[in-house]
């Protein structure tokens, strides 16, 4: 039977992964763009990792909070923090939901690859949509300028997506095997104690 209440174990797991997402988001290479900034960074890999380790809503929450807190610490991104929370939440949530669907438990390699790709592509679509809307409606840029911005940020986002899947899938497999032997992790995921 699955307990539907938020437990202390949920809070600890989400808090720990939030911190990892926050720290990993700081490891980056900036890429110049016509409007704004784009980066290749490790944050997305840890957003997916949160989904793989914690499942849908907990993974999404850790991904969203860690990324939002990063935005709060960087003047270039602070105004985007609420949108970042939503976009990164969806990334971790989609990844975690798919990895744990149909009692898969986040343990199936091919399913995890597909889940990681789906989570990453969800984020890319949301991020690029936000970029177009922001460029045209808030920055009052011409459509052509917004398209050039997308042409710059799109490849960077896809590189981040690929890096995220390449790093998170094997890392999740290794960490999950170790964590499944801990009481904290088993109680958080409501697993039967062996």
Image (spheres, rainbow, N blue to C red):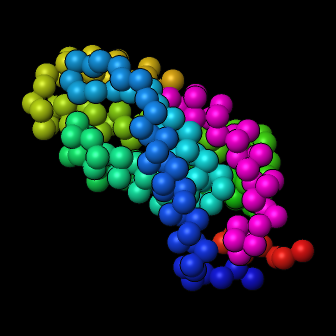
All told, the count of numbered labels is 0
In the picture, measured across the screen, residue 128 lies left or right of residue 111, that is: left
- Indicate the position of residue 59 as horizontal and vertical percent values: 55, 58
Quarter-wise, where is residue 125 in the image? top left
Q: Residue at x 78, y 42 (%)?
A: 109
Does the segment drawn in magenta span residue 133? no
Q: Residue at x 46, y 33 (%)?
A: 27
- Indicate the position of residue 165 as horizontal and vertical percent values: 62, 35
In the picture, measured across the screen, residue 121 lies left or right of residue 1, that is: left
Q: Residue at x 16, y 31 (%)?
A: 136
Does the segment drawn in magenta span residue 179? yes
- Indicate the position of residue 142 as horizontal and vertical percent values: 13, 22
Residue 89 versus residue 164 in the image, above or below: below
Instruction: Please identify the quadrant where the C terminus is shown.
Output: bottom right
Residue in the foreground of this view, choosing between 184 and 122:
184
Residue in the foreground of this view, choosing between 53 and 125:
53
Q: Main secondary structure of the magenta part?
A: helix
Q: Residue at x 70, y 59 (%)?
A: 101
In the picture, measured across the screen, residue 74 lies left or right of residue 108, that is: left
Instruction: Please identify the quadrant where the N terminus is shown.
Output: bottom right
Residue 60 visible in image = no
Quarter-wise, where is residue 104 in the image? bottom right
Residue 154 versus residue 14 in the image, above or below: above
Residue 128 visible in image = yes
In the image, the segment drawn in magenta is 160-187
| Residue occupying the far left of the picture | 140
């Amino acid at each position: 039977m699955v307990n539907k209440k938020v437990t202390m174990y949920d809070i600890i797991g989400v808090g720990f992964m939030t911190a990892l997402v926050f720290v990993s988001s700081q490891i980056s290479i900036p890429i110049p763009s016509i409007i704004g900034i784009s980066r290749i960074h490790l944050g997305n890999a840890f957003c997916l990792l949160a989904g793989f380790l914690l499942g849908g809503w907990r993974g999404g929450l850790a991904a969203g909070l860690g990324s939002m807190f990063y935005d709060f610490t960087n003047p270039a991104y602070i105004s985007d923090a609420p949108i970042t929370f939503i976009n990164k939440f969806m990334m971790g949530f989609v990844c975690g939901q798919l990895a744990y669907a149909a009692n898969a438990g986040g343990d199936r390699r091919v399913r995890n690859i597909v889940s990681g790709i789906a989570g990453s592509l969800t984020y890319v679509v949301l991020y690029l949509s936000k970029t177009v809307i922001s460029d045209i409606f808030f920055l009052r840029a011409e459509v052509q300028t917004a398209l050039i911005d997308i042409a710059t940020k799109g490849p960077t986002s896809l590189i981040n997506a690929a890096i995220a899947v390449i790093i998170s899938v094997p890392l999740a497999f290794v960490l999950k095997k170790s964590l499944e032997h801990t009481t904290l992790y088993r109680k958080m995921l409501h697993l039967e104690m062996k």
